Image (spheres, rainbow, N blue to C red):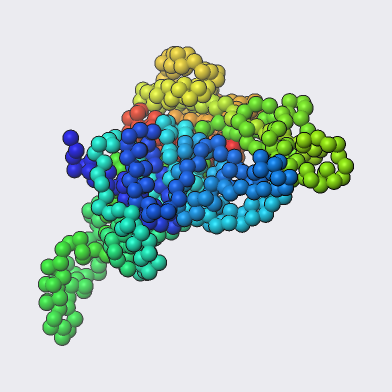
Amino acid sequence: MQTDDTMARWLRALLPAALCALDPAGCGGVRLRAQAGPARDAWLAQLRALLPPGTPLRRIPLDAPDARLLGGLDLAATLRAGRPVAERGLLVEAHGGVVLLAMAERISSAAAARLTAVMDEGVVVMLRDGMEAREAAEFGVIALDEAQGDDENLPAALCDRLACIVDLEGLRAGDCPQLPFDAGHIAAARARLPTVSVSPVVIQSLGAAAQAFGVDSLRAFMLAVRAARAAAALDGRDQVGEPDVTLAAQLVLAPRATQCPASAAEAPADASPEAAAPDQPPDSTPAEAAPPPGDAGGEQRDEQKDDRPADLQQPLEDRVLDAVRAALSPDLLAHIRLAGGRLPRARSAGRSGALRGNGQRGRPVGVRKGRPGGGLRLSVIDTLRAAAPWQVLRRRQGMPATRVAVRPEDFRIVRYRQRTQTTTIFVVDASGSSALHRLGEAKGAVELLLADCYVRRDRVAVIAFRGTRAELLLPPTRSLVRAKRSLAGLPGGGGTPLAAGIEAGWSLADALRRQGDTPTLVLLTDGRGNVARDGLGGRARAEQDAQAAARRVRASALRTLFIDTSPRPHPSAQSLAAGMGALYAPLSAADAQGISRLVKQAGAQSAGQNG
């Protein structure tokens, strides 16, 4: 049975399709989060129906080579004609329309860089295989995101250029409504779009909303302005109004929010008129409320002001902030609260293991000049492509009469890139203070994270520190049973040798990195060390040693997560996390499940940091 909430979700999901059909290159495109199925097919069918006749729609497969994507040498035609013959790329064919990027979560960073470069310039410049060409290529991108876990994500550069993020999870194709406009309406709006103007107040309100919600990307702000213009053109107006601004802010800025400003209702109680004017006597009337002398119309203006609706008395900036705040998803709000008010900015995407070059194994990432041998493999097709343009000249030079004349300088070998293994190192505070607080909750969070590492086939290690030293309870392993057993038998009590724990985690991470692994350090402690590195007591020396160890971790550029196990966030833990360059998360803000979700999200956002 269709509900009002389902209808609202579907309409919110379909509006980006209309904006993209109206202004594909201006709005950048849409990141469509959905598995292949009826719901995604219904969304794409609406997009196709909205595109005006003659608008190109091209599908780009994941393994499309550069020659097919950007254009290049047509090898078969070149060999037949005996001269270089060029072929047009998919991006040039999509000029003025839309491209569907299949399995976008698996796109390589190199392919994403080539795609985004064309999106920025609006042209494809081809300088390869002895040919030179420059053709227009302005289009929008529908990135079909089929990621099923936090370890798969779109490259940040591509996400930054897509205006809207649409999530179809939980929606059914049978509930999909029909939008109240068609391709003819879109064509008329396209003709109206160049005449739509934007006032400085609108630009200021969108900029204020982006700053308030922690949207650091300037492209997101520019995409929001373009989306507001497209919305106005779609509604038949030549001036961007408040409905267009709020819609653009909800569609473009809300999914990118990394913080949530307090609403007017949550303002501190001391922000009262009396507090704002402490020098006024209590019985006197505030200066702002007193009408100026001789102003007989003051009471009439106050009466007119009071008669206006409360929402219209707010500035446009505040109304836009309220609209974005209402559009934030509950999951995003929970993650912002867990991260201490602000989420870390996404760096790149993909699995957490770093990428390194490999001559024999891994994923092919291109070709280079070179001779086969020593484990290097010859790319026959690319070798023929390099030799094809020179066939006529080589026959004139008297080379042997063969079907294809190949010289050593034509040889191309395949380059491979292999993802290294990821090892998550859990450094757990088992001292008396931590056991008194929430050691059991910390164990629960670690067990959930261990299970997630097991699903990704990552290795895990467990280090505990208490008393006067740190101990490696579990060497790096993939055995989930061993990891849970070592954690379940972890006792609590004794002093807090915080510096020894950080040093032990750093030493193990450094050793794993030297072996070619990608280590991740997860530290669970209240941050209140009282045992120095030499095993002697003293809180002052212990804090100095802990800060020194933290600086060493930061200098090593390790990906580090600091989970504060105190009953409430403590300044010493926050200071130590900042010294380590770690993501700080207070365990007091959620249960074990919430911390597990936050850590997995942080791992996905900072994936590829070492690549």
Residue 297 in the image, given as x and y percentages of width and height: 13, 81
Residues 78 and 468: in front is 78
Q: Is residue 488 left or right of residue 398?
A: left
Q: Nearer the viewer, residue 132 or 78?
A: 78
The quadrant in which the C terminus is found is top right
Q: Residue furthest bottom?
A: 294
Q: How many marks?
A: 0
Q: In the visual, does 227 lie left or right of 120?
A: left
- Location of residue 41 in the rendering, given as x and y in whole percent from the top left corner: 35, 38
Question: In the image, what residue occupies the spot 51% across and 27% down?
Answer: 424
Q: Is residue 472 visible?
A: no
Q: Quadrant of residue 571?
A: top left
Q: Quick check: 148 above or below 206?
A: above
Looking at the picture, tell me which residue is in the foreground, 28 or 400: 400
Residue for point 21% across, 65% down: 313
Q: Residue at x 67, y 54 (%)?
A: 132
Q: Residue at x 41, y 16 (%)?
A: 488
Q: Position of residue 503 (x, y in %)?
A: 57, 29
> Residue 338 versus residue 384: which sits nearer the camera?
384
- The relative height of residue 320 versus residue 578 in the rendered view (above or below) is below
Check the picture and name the quadrant holding the N terminus: top left
Residue 52 visible in the snapshot: yes
Q: Quick check: 270 left or right of 367?
A: left
